[in-house]
Amino acid sequence: MKSRPRSSPASRKLQASKAKKDRLGYTIMALSLGVVIFLAAIGILTRPTKADPLTGCPLDRKPPQSHTILLVDETDKLSRAELAYAKALILNEYYWLPIGGRLTVRTIVSDRDSAEDIAVCRMDDGSKSLGIYDNAKMIRKTFDKTAGARLEKLYEALKNAPIQANSPIMEYVAEAMDRANFGSNVKARRLVILSDMAQHSDLHSQYGRSARGKPSKQAMEELERDMTGVHVRIQYVPRRSLSAMQGKAHRAFWTSYFEKMKAERAAVGHGLLIGEDSARETFSDGS
């Protein structure tokens, strides 16, 4: 039996070097493949969600992390000063939303079937990538792009709105709470009402009686909702024609109404910072 020829030290060293290079090559290939897979996974996870070009809102059908519903009373026209304030209020509520947060502006009209929604979601305006926090002009530009034209129609309607037969404010609040995108699975919920708060409907009316008159048991069975965690801000519009109704007792009625439904920090007044920390920033675009 022939013995196997013994390799020289130089040959063994060459073979060992080749094996080492092969292992290094395999390691590099494995690491490269891992990096490719990792980057692909990151790309999938961070891929921007498709958005509705009209509203800027995601089309993924997931509930928003933050949703503000702003009910604007259109049962009577607003003065020029109140109309300017309404514009500032709407823009400011948009400004306070986080990126991806949803703002729904809904009109309060006598015929609830004809009420309109204007939805817009807070979009990334690119300011953070430029090292600027919430650049005012960029915010206004993205806001106007998604909601500007539709809101201008609303402002025109508010300027010329005729006095309507009913003002079903409580009903609109109940409907807001019933919305699928305003449920308890939404992390931050905020309900803002711009109105003289003169409730008048078949279920409950504040006309011709004390502003402190409580809704009937039947009315509350239909209107009462669990508002736990919902921040409520009532932007109270004073009117000379309602001076006999409006006042301290009327404000107290509405504060109590929302507190009984466990709303979070219900505040009644007139000003962008009612119920807010006085140090909280308000939107300003220089106009």
Image (cartoon, rainbow, N blue to C red):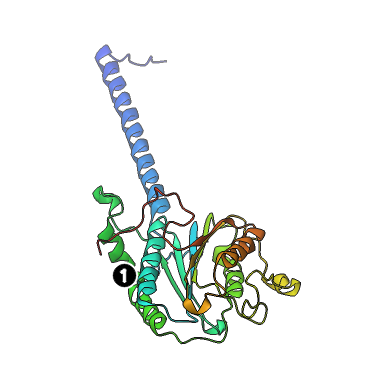
Looking at the rendered image, the quarter that the C terminus falls into is bottom left
Q: Position of residue 53 (x, y in %)?
A: 36, 71
For label 1, the crowd category at 10 Å Cα-Cα, with few meaning under 14, some 14 to 19 and many 20 or more, is: some
Which amino acid type is marked by label 1? Asp
Q: Residue at x 37, y 51 (%)?
A: 43
The residue pinned by badge 1 equals: 144
In this view of the protein, which residue sits in the foreground, 29 or 221?
221
Label 1 element class: helix
Q: Residue at x 68, y 67 (%)?
A: 224
Residue 23 seen in the current view: yes
Q: Position of residue 44 (x, y in %)?
A: 41, 53
Which quadrant would residue 110 be assigned to in this image? bottom right
In this view of the protein, which residue sits in the foreground, 190 or 13?
190
Q: Residue at x 58, y 57 (%)?
A: 185
Compared with 193, 241 (above or below) is below
Left-right relation of 225 to 68: right
Figure disc tally: 1
Q: Residue at x 31, y 65 (%)?
A: 142
Q: Position of residue 244 (x, y in %)?
A: 56, 75
Left-right relation of 249 to 132: right
